[in-house]
Image (spheres, grey):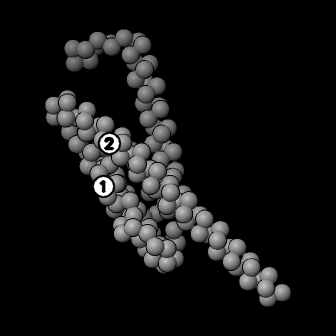
Amino acid sequence: MEFNGITFTEDMIWALGIAAIASYTIRAFYCNTLKKTLDLISEDNRCMKPTMAWLALIPLFSIYWNFVIASRMADSLTNEFYDRKIPEEEDPGKKTGSIYSISTALANLPLFQGFSMIAAIFSIIYFIRYWIKIDNFRVLLKEHNRFLAQKKEQKEHEII
C-alpha cells in the first residue's frame, strides 16, 4: 500500500492498527477517570456533565475539548472543595491540564517534524501528570465521602 509516495508494508499497517487501538483504550480509561471524578462532585458544583468527558475520544475535536475539560474540571473541583471546606490548590489541575492541552494542539500543527516531536513528548508527559492529578482528586473526594459516612454513622450510634 502506498500513501503520499511512502510504501507501507503489512507489518507497518498492523503496528499502526495496534498502536491506534492501544491509544484509544488508554484514552477511554482516562475519560472514565474524568467521568468518575465528575460523578463524585455534587450536581450544583459541576461545570460539565460527567458523560461529556467521553467527548475527548472524538478525533480532532478532542484537541479543542482538552481545553474545555481543563477549565471546567478545575472550576468544578474548586466549587466542590469550597463547599466541602477541603483546603486545596487554587484552580486544581488547571495549570497541568492547560499545558497538556496546549502541547497537544502544538503537536498536531503541521510544522517541522522536530517541533512536533518535542510537543508530542511534552503532551504525553503532561497527559500522564494531568491524569494522575485528576485521579488523586477523585480519591480525595471518595475518601472524604467515606469520612462523612463514618462521621454520620458515629453520630447515629451515639444517639442510640
Which quadrant is home to the N terminus?
Answer: top left
Q: Secondary structure at mark 2?
A: helix
The residue under the point 46% across, 50% down is: 132
In the picture, measured across the screen, residue 110 lies left or right of residue 141, that is left
The residue under the point 45% across, 77% down is: 82
| Residue 153 quadrant | bottom right
Of residues 81 and 56, the one nearer the viewer is 81
Residue 97 percent location from the top left of the image = 35, 54
Mark 1 lies on residue? 98
Q: Secondary structure at mark 1?
A: helix
The residue under the point 46% across, 25% down is: 18
Q: CA distance from mark 2 to mark 1?
A: 10 Å
Mark 2 lies on residue? 123
Q: Amino acid at mark 2?
A: Ser
Relative to 30, residue 134 above or below: below
> Of label 2 and label 1, which has the lower sequence position?
1
Q: Residue furthest bottom?
A: 159
Q: Are marks 2 and 1 in contact (CB under 8 Å)?
A: no
Residue 105 percent location from the top left of the image = 25, 45
